[in-house]
Amino acid sequence: MAFDFPSAAWTDAYKDAINANANYKVAGKDWTHGAVAMVVKAEPSVGIAEDLGMILDVHAGECRGCRLVGASEAQDAPFVVQASYAQWKAVIKREIDPTKALMQGKLKLVKGHMPTMVKYVQSSKELVESTSRVPTRFPDEG
Amino acid sequence: MSLVSLAPGADENGFACMIADLLGQNLEANPHKQRDFKKMRGSVAVVAEDADVAITLVFDGRHATIHSGILNKPDVTVRGMAEVIMNMSNLPIAKYVGLPLPRLGNPTERAAMDDMLAAMKRGELHTHGLLGHAPLVVRFTRVLSVNG
């Protein structure tokens, strides 16, 4: 079964995918710096009328919750990574590497302490890698 | 005036924005790194070859300006794969000697150092200008390190 991206069902499946990722458990075991939000910019052509966020309540190698929220609520998270729908889709499909995407400005850390993100770069990569483990249906692919 | 700023147009370069945040926040959170920062004079270009992005940091002893692309003829040029360049900031810095060295009995730091040396052997990281500007390179490593 595939889940529509982005949707509440997708975020539930994403939480399960993170917790099933053994590499994340190891890489994220020392992460105690709070939630990470992933914001998808509005893309009316695929039905995303306004910016959406997914707040990942990650702590010590575990995802305790994952919620689909509005963009303003997402900004309450200590760390916010933002990208267009097309870039998130490319990340989920593993068409772009998250480190390169950050350097190229395709993904942006719009809020949060960059040295902490760099220190836990492997943890962040495994969070992003977990997105590709969610069976996903994209609205522009029918 | 902040210690780090972006040159006009550099805000369009994702790598420049990342390094500006990393350097500025690192200096703010670790005042001891400012001693190194205030001794830095010269320019360092960093090229992430597989990401096709480059920046040049110009240090004048008080401030660093980050430019998009390679500016003039940098004193030092670091070229490498994006991931290896990011991992440079995760190298352990030995407390008293101030050089990238893992602590004895720390497998995480040992692994970070081994990964970097292996990447250099594979040709995934090159530093040009190291011999002529060794203090600048060492200080550059220290001010960007998120460890120590």
Image (cartoon, rainbow, N blue to C red):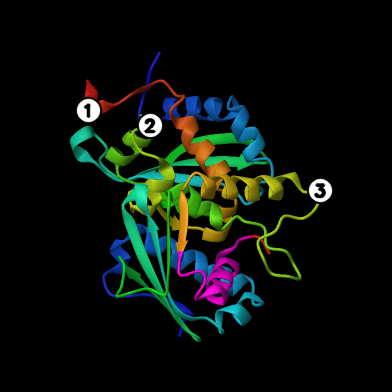
Q: Residue at x 58, y 73 (%)?
A: B139
**Chain at tag 2:** A
In the structure shown, which secondary structural element does the residue marked by tag 2 occupy?
Answer: loop
Residue type at the position of mark 1 = Asp
Q: Which residue is mark 2?
A: A94
Q: Nearer the viewer, residue B141 or B134?
A: B134
Identified at 60% across, 31% down, the residue is A23
Q: Is residue A116 above or below residue A22?
A: below
Q: Nearer the viewer, mark 3 or mark 1?
A: 3
Mark 3 lies on residue = B105
Q: CA distance from mark 1 to mark 2?
A: 17 Å
Task: Out of A135 and B122, give the one closest to the viewer.
Answer: B122
The verdict on residue A112 being magenta is: no
Direction from residue B100 to residue A107 in the image, left or right: left
Residue A22 lies, in percent from the top left, at 62, 28
Q: Tell me which amino acid carries mark 2.
A: Arg
Please report the bounds of the magenta region as a residue range.
Answer: B128-146
